[in-house]
Amino acid sequence: MAHLTGHISRRSFLGGTIAGAFGAPALTSTLRAQVAQPAPATAARRLVSQVLIPRQSGKAVFLNRDQRLKVINPKGKQVGDLFAFRREALTEFIAPAYTMTRNRRIYLEVGKPLYSNRGNPLLMFEEDTVGVHDLLYPACSGGQRPGIAAARPNCRDNMQAALRAVDVTPPEQPELVHPHNLFQNSPVTNLEGQIEIREPLAKPGDYVVLHAMDKLVVVVTACSVVGVVNGGEPRELLMEVYE
């Protein structure tokens, strides 16, 4: 086995990426845990609620400051679109463009915040057993166009339905609210900036934990796309809230 030194990047982990092009070794399954070393963020906390997200649907939960949200991949290989809105100002929501530019990286990293469209940190990415997520893709829209309804289940509509289900008014322009795509494996693969959609690396039981830095309403949708992005077919996800 090649000896690994220094920081292990997600690119070298995925293989065939920019780092790989310069000779960085791909990670083996034995070394996978070195990419993300989770701290027991929820171990000493009380479970407040547990919400199942059926396949091709979305659910919303309310978080108070300093509560934790655990998003679990029960069967593995399922993408979850993450949305979060400030309860005191619903026009402020997490925005991947701000997360990328504030953190100076295109991947989520444990210990770094998820920022809002007003530049405020709303969630802290606290724990991660997968190490591979996406900040580049918008929510799937089921083929929606101005004046044309969606032809199939999609995360944009499911996000709005989840908000309505908890008596929260959806955004006036939902197409401008982009998700942080948990568990999605769509790396930049070369110096020309090409993106490749790959099967998620999340195994059954993998999860992330997010720390609320404000009073929020959070939506997670179980991505509806049938294809490699969800390992062939959509599956359910699970949310747990801790305090």
Image (cartoon, rainbow, N blue to C red):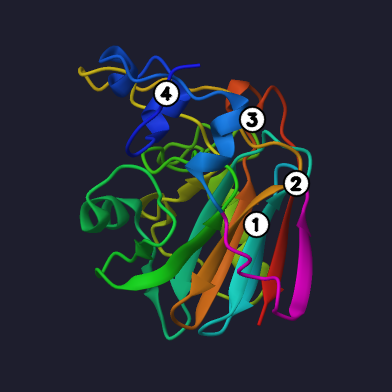
Neighbour tally class for label 1: few under 14, some 14-19, many 20 plus, Cα within 10 Å: many
Residue 138: x and y, percent?
Answer: 42, 41
Residue 131 in sight from this viewpoint: no
Instruction: Please indicate whether residue 173 sits to the left or right of residue 57 in the image.
Output: left
Distance between the alpha carbons at the discs numbered 2 and 4: 29 Å
Neighbour tally class for label 4: few under 14, some 14-19, many 20 plus, Cα within 10 Å: few
**Label 3 sits on what residue type?**
Asn
Q: Nearer the viewer, mark 1 or mark 3?
A: 1
**Label 2 sits on what residue type?**
Gly
Distance between the alpha carbons at the discs numbered 2 and 1: 10 Å
Mark found first going from the N terminus, 2 or 1: 1
Mark 1 residue element: strand
Examine the structure image and report whether residue 42 is included in the region drawn in magenta: yes
Q: Are marks 1 and 4 in contact (CB under 8 Å)?
A: no
**Label 1 sits on what residue type?**
Val
Q: Nearer the viewer, mark 2 or mark 1?
A: 2
Q: State the residue position of label 2.
A: 205
Q: On residue 71, which mark appears?
A: 1
Distance between the alpha carbons at the discs numbered 3 and 4: 32 Å
Residue 143 in sight from this viewpoint: yes
Q: State the residue position of label 3.
A: 230
Q: Residue at x 24, y 68 (%)?
A: 119
Q: Residue at x 54, y 51 (%)?
A: 37
Q: State the residue position of label 4.
A: 3
Distance between the alpha carbons at the discs numbered 1 and 4: 33 Å
Magenta range is 38-54
Picture layout, residue 159 above or below residue 63: above
Mark 2 residue element: loop
Q: Are marks 1 and 3 in contact (CB under 8 Å)?
A: no
Q: Residue at x 51, y 84 (%)?
A: 65
Distance between the alpha carbons at the discs numbered 3 and 2: 15 Å
